[in-house]
Amino acid sequence: MKKLGDVVVPFHRENRPLPDPEAMLRTLLRHPDVRRFAERHPELPLDCYRRSLILLSQFVTERTSCRQCPGLEKCPNSAPGHYPVLEQYGLAISLKLTECSKLRSHKESERRRSLIRSHHIPVEIRNATFESVELSAKREEAVSAAIDFCMEFENGLPDKGLYLYGPFGVGKSYIAGAVTNQLASIGIASVMVHLPALVEEMKGAINENSVSDKVDALKTTTVLILDDIGAETLTPWIRDDILSVIFQYRMTEHLPTIYTSNLSLDELEEHFAHTGKGGFEPLKAKRLMERIRPFVRPILVEGRNRRYDQ
């Protein structure tokens, strides 16, 4: 079965009377996208455009919708998540529907999520938006930094990720959740996982021979959000063969990462130095932190514990 993006829509779908077709044609030909197409194909006669009024009308309507995009879920186009492209076939015009960046990003995020079962992100965090974030003086810097992080994608990838740390229940994960939804609205792929649950899943993935696939999904996503880092049960294998591999790749490829934690960066380094059975390896901990510390903006998030709110 062909993908929708590869299917060319026939240029004649309907045969119904058009009100004042010549006036409609003149209006359509003035549209910038139609005009550019006509300039690229001077060999097409005017009659070709006359025969394609309905197609051209659909093209202009949907291109206008794309420029005022309301988001993937509210896409008004005939094929949601697709934008139209005019194509020439001999002396005829056809319309090709192509997946937009938001749909491609959504599919890529879903593919990555299918590889990682232990997101363990509560529904209220998955649905978080910056509009629903409760502002307070003690969270203002974190919220502002998160918004700035998303806005930086207008000019490419941000130089640094975020390290949101502080007491339990102050909203660190909620702010991170708002980032994922804002990024999705602008077509940027991201994956948010609860790290302690992920660690347990990685241990089980050994028998499934799926560790490599899971690591690849995490290390290559455009934005990775690791929730509650420092709360995981640490082993040398998790630190050196899982986390180190993910962080090394993301550092090399300049891919931004957001962390939430109850620990400061110094406390996280101490956490990484201690492994099971009394192991203490400060050099390996420092090496891992060199893949985190220079590439994040640390922000203390404080306030009341909202988990006790009724």
Image (cartoon, grey):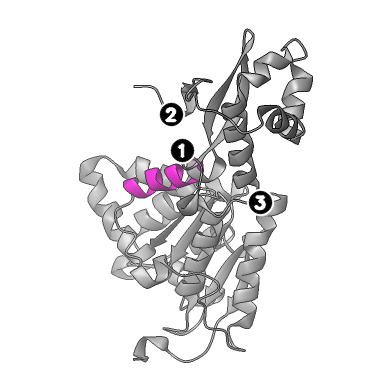
Gap between marks 1 and 2, in whole Å? 9 Å
Gap between marks 3 and 1, in whole Å? 29 Å
The dot on residue 33 is: none
In what element is the residue under mark 2?
Answer: helix
State the image coordinates of residue 110 (x, y, percent, origin top left).
39, 47
Magenta-colored stretch includes residue 254: no
The residue at which mark 3 appears reads as 157
State the image coordinates of residue 153 (x, y, percent, origin top left).
66, 54
In what element is the residue under mark 3?
Answer: loop
For the image, the number of numbered tags is 3
The residue at which mark 1 appears reads as 79
Q: Which residue corresponds to the image point at 20% horizontal and 44% vertical from the top-left?
A: 207
**Residue 218 visible somewhere in the drawing:** yes
State the image coordinates of residue 33 (x, y, percent, origin top left).
72, 32
Gap between marks 3 and 2, in whole Å? 30 Å
Q: Are discs 1 and 2 less than 8 Å apart at CB? A: yes
The residue at which mark 2 appears reads as 4
Q: Which residue corresponds to the image point at 44% horizontal and 71% vertical from the top-left?
A: 271
The amino acid type of the residue labelled 3 equals Leu
The amino acid type of the residue labelled 1 equals Ala
Q: If you read the primary sequence from the N terminus, does the residue marked by circle 3 or circle 1 appear first?
A: 1
Relative to 219, say whether 185 is above or below.
Answer: below
Relative to 124, say whether 239 is above or below.
Answer: above
Relative to 243, say whether 134 is above or below.
Answer: below
Magenta segment: 104-114
